[in-house]
């Protein structure tokens, strides 16, 4: 299972053309997966109901000859009747705290019923099933950094429970279909990831800080800003996903960046990048907001090899350029 350093790491880049169905294709991560698979010659079926995604993310691929889009709520079923699938990738779920707290029932349903519908579809096609889980399954962790063997510290009835428990159930039913029905499954636990195509009103910290800084507004730091996160740029996540598809490993795998930062330091980074004085407006820390988060990457590196990480500085520069470009385009068109 280890990948010899000298060998190229197998990934979708070198495989035969595949037929891949992606739920959540109009979202941030889903749209990057669509792009990667189309660029590599695969056929992609995207499914989304736009609860937290963007039509513009579907429009990017709408005219592509190997892309089909189905607008549907996957919690109610996945209405795919086409040719045999090789993979079902289940990425549908609101992921930003303001979004999933606005739609708690829908979030639970897509983690529960949506996951089962994806597993049934994969089973019927003899396809692989790939679950996007999250570092939130560790809750507010007492073990730091978090290895996959840590069972977590989750409030089962708190405001974040609709997301955390949905993903914990999703992992459980994925393991059950693997063990009892032989489905070829994968589970990743994604740590905070950022990049282009997040909604401007996504509400997650990097998009908030960059938009606020560009508007000349104070940055909204929740609590005293001492809580930590470890941010990964989208390209590294996509690389990890495409490698894991080719490794027969059915237990959860952390995908993230080990470089950890406090939210106060993040606010300072964004301000100095934009050459503005740091102006901060403090808000209460949201309930059950994890105080620390950082992945242990031992398993990921053992089975996938080392995945190159974009530095936070470089990633932030790219995001700033992208958001500046979006703002100037919207000013020109208005
Ligand atoms: P996102 O909100 O941008 O994308 C999720 C997509 O799923 C949206 O397009 C939304 O409309 C769609 N969706 C939600 N419920 C649906 C349903 N019932 N039927 C059809 N479509 C539905 O979020 P994202 O950041 O791209 O996250 C994608 C996946 O990765 C999610 O499963 C999330 O839990 C996981 N994840 C992301 C991060 C991160 O930092 N971005 C971290 C951990 C886990
Ligand atoms: N946060 C913040 N200001 C914001 C948005 C978020 O200080 O405008 C904090 C939030 O309280 C959390 C961290 O940034 O501690 C990461 O939040 P995010 O919503 O991006 O992701 P989470 O890891 O909480 O799901």
Image: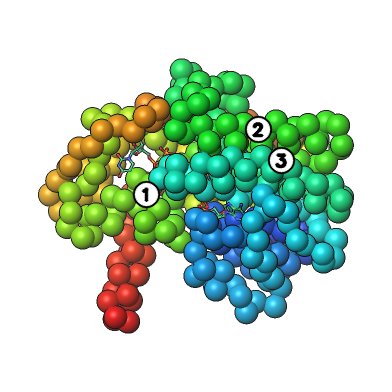
Distance from label 1 to label 3 (Cα)? 28 Å
Image quarter of residue 188: top right
125 with respect to 309 (left or right): right
Whether residue 55 is visible here, answered yes or no, is yes
Residue 291 on image: x %, y %? 37, 26
Residue drawn at point x = 42 percent, y = 59 percent:
199
Image quarter of residue 250: top right
Q: Which residue is mark 1?
A: 203
Q: Give the color scheme: rainbow, by chain, secondary structure or one colour.
A: rainbow
Q: Badges 1 and 3: C-beta atoms under 8 Å apart?
A: no
117 with respect to 237 (left or right): right
Quarter of the picture containing the N terminus is top right
Q: Which residue is mark 3?
A: 186
Badge 2 local density, few (<14 within 10 Å), some, or many (20+)?
Answer: some
Q: Which residue is mark 2?
A: 169
Disc 1 C-beta below 8 A from ligand 2: yes
If the picture is divided into quarters, which one holds ligand 2? top left
Residue 261 on image: x %, y %? 34, 35
Residue drawn at point x = 51 percent, y = 59 percent:
53
Image height check: is 161 above or below 315? above
Distance from label 2 to label 3 (Cα)? 15 Å
Between 108 and 306, the one lying in front of the other is 108
């Amino acid at each position: 299972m280890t990948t010899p350093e000298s060998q190229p790491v197998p990934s979708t880049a070198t495989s035969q053309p595949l037929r891949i169905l992606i739920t959540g294709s109009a979202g941030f991560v889903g749209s990057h997966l669509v792009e990667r698979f189309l660029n590599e010659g695969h056929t992609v079926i995207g499914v989304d109901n736009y609860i937290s995604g963007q039509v513009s993310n579907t429009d990017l691929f709408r005219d592509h000859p190997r892309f089909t889009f189905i607008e549907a709520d996957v919690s109610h079923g996945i209405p795919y009747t086409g040719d045999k699938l090789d993979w079902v990738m289940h990425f549908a779920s609101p992921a930003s705290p303001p979004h999933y707290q606005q739609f708690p029932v829908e979030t639970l349903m897509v983690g529960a019923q949506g996951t089962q519908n994806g597993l049934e579809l994969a089973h019927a096609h003899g396809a692989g099933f790939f679950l996007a889980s999250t570092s939130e399954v560790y809750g507010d962790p007492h073990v730091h950094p978090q290895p996959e063997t840590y069972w977590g510290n989750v409030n089962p009835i708190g405001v974040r429970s609709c997301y955390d428990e949905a993903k914990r159930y999703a992992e459980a039913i994925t393991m059950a279909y693997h063990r009892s029905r032989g489905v070829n499954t994968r589970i990743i636990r994604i740590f905070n990831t950022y990049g282009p195509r997040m909604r401007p009103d996504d509400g997650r910290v990097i998009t908030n800080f960059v938009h606020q800084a560009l508007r000349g507004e104070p940055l909204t730091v929740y609590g005293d800003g001492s809580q930590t996160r470890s941010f990964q740029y989208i390209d590294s996540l996509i690389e990890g996903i495409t490698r894991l598809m080719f490794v027969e490993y059915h237990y959860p795998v952390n995908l993230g960046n080990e470089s950890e930062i406090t939210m106060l330091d993040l606010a300072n980074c964004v301000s100095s990048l934009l050459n503005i004085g740091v102006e901060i407006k403090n808000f209460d820390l949201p309930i059950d907001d994890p105080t620390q988060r950082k992945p242990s990457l031992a398993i990921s590196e053992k089975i996938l090899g080392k995945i190159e990480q974009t530095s936070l500085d470089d990633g932030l520069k790219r995001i700033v350029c992208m958001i500046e470009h979006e703002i100037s385009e919207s000013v020109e068109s208005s």
